[in-house]
Amino acid sequence: MSQSLSSLLSSLSSSLDNTSLTINNWDEILSEFISNYSFQLTFIPNPFTNIQIKQNFLNLYKNKRLFSKDFNLNLDLNFLRIILRESNGLNDFLTSDVLQFFLNLLQNDLNNKNLILKSFLNFIHHSRELRLQILQNYNYLETVEKIQNSLELNNLESHFLFSRFLFYLTFEEQNANFIVTKNLNILQKLIQEMNFYFNNFLQQNVTSHLTTENKTLEQSLEDVTNHLKEMEGPTTTNTKQHSVTLVREPLRLTFSPFFLSFLEDGMKTLYNCFAHVNVEELTKLFENDLFPLLSNTIHFYSFNYMIFSFKDCIQSQNENLMGDNDDYDWKENFENTKDQLFILIRHTLQICMWLSLEKLPNESKEEFNLFTKIVNENNFIVILYAFISEYINHIDKDSDYVDFLVPIIKLLENLALTYPFCKDKLYDWIFNDINWPLQKSPTIKQNVIEMIKERNDKFIRKREERNKQMKDFLEKMDSDEDLTLSQILKASAEQEEEKEQETTEENKQASSSSSSSTIKEEEKENKEEQEEKESDSLDASDLIYKQIKTVFIMGMTSTNYDFKTVLCNFLFILCNQDAKQFASDCGVGNAVGFLGEKGLIGNVFSNINLQEM
């Protein structure tokens, strides 16, 4: 007797013994599920009212359908691809017999490997134990090799799915070590395939459009950056009058489906291996394949991001760089791919950081030196600009993007430590808001601007209110044993009070010298109100007119400890790891917690004469 999906689920909720159920129309039930829920990511409470019913349904499916002769490859794999999106209720389904079932399909039906891999990836994504089993069993490893060897050269979807498969497999340190030590050829071939597709893309979309001088992408990037440098300074007001011969026809970047996803997951796989495995084990990858891939990725990203970000400052002599006279929408094209390109460059640079001179064996140091000559200051200035932009526009009140922001901060920190010019550039940008490329700081979204204003308003206190709070706090501190900290805060408060008195006197003198007839009543009220307001003495003093600095400073008091610690450490490095400079630039109140954890808080106030207190 045939039944619908809803009636079957109703039977499962009321039946104690599901093994006795007989289903004669599995195809109809699965088709109904696919039709109703193909775009759904979670299935509890709909169609399953609770986890137990979902488990009962999957157990019934597994026992009565999955291993039966009625298994329909296309229908069942599409059902599995959907149902395995969600982890709830999969415990009894994530088992070795199902793993064996998938691997047998991959071993024996390579013509349908894309469909099988899509379901299989969702399956192993939920289970560390199953991912480990794949490489511990020699037969399973042979299957992995067989899948890779079966990939057609021009089938990007297959390459993408396999690169994601390797990305999942290298999540765990044990698996990453196993691949590197037992079969490094898998990674070697992955890098070669990435190079092949990337070189083809560059040839079709970029290199063939460059000037007739036969310049490479690297040389053209250098032309653009040198051109921008020449335009900085006194002539910046007339930047649009300048021109640079960059291309002989409009650039129209066309990304084939799965191309960026393939590169992204391939780079993630390599990063997993570098993070888990001793670098010496990976030296075979360096000389012929890895460095060209890293170099091409960095050059392309720099080239692409620079042209978009400084479009209004770069013109080819025949004004066809952007193809403004045709229907090609450069901005839309860039926006559609910006996020994937950013993830790609982030993982690329993370690998570069792992390839620091300290971690490379002696025989590879010369090769790395060649790489750092290729990846020059021009590349990094553009990349730093991109990273700062991404950070600024992903900061939020609720720390929703912490997992995205922490790697960015760590990467900026590593770049600052590895390359002194990166540290100097970042310090100028963040703390002084100067020396931006073409004096063009990153655009700040409106919601971030509002958050900056809200944050700064909280740190503006009327003088009487702030002094009362400080007095009450110091009185409380005087009753504690930590007299040194009390004296420190009291000295800081008195210094601030002296500054306030000097400011007030100057304002009075300025007011008396002005003609009252020329000052509007509204201006008077605003001035008086401003005199009553002062920045919190424990906050950085220049945040009101430095928005980008505010975005970084406000992260120092985040409720997310990991994010706050990473950010403070990054800013501390930009301040030359000098406690006094750090407290001065960031504000004592923002810096005191971090410095206290590092045992450096006494260094900040060593210039205060406590004996006079």
Image (cartoon, rainbow, N blue to C red):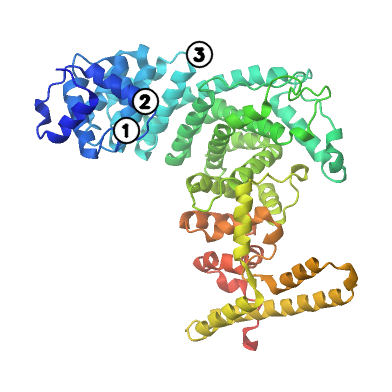
Residue underneath mark 1: 131
Task: Find the distance from the CA under tag 1 to the CA under tag 3.
Answer: 28 Å
Q: Residue furthest top?
A: 111
What's the amino acid at mark 3?
Asn
Q: Residues within 10 Å of mark 2 (few under 14, many from 20)?
A: some
Q: Position of residue 168 (x, y in %)?
A: 39, 32
Task: Find the distance from the CA under tag 2 to the CA under tag 3.
Answer: 28 Å
Disc 2 or 3, which lies upstream in sequence?
2
Numbered disc 1: secondary structure: helix
Locate the N terminus and report the quarter of the image it occupies: top left
Residue underneath mark 2: 38
Disc 1 or 2, which lies upstream in sequence?
2
Q: Position of residue 605 (x, y in %)?
A: 62, 75
Q: Is residue 132 left or right of residue 376?
A: left
Camera-near label (2 vs 3) is 2
Q: Position of residue 267 (x, y in %)?
A: 50, 32
Residue underneath mark 3: 154
Q: Residue furthest bottom?
A: 612
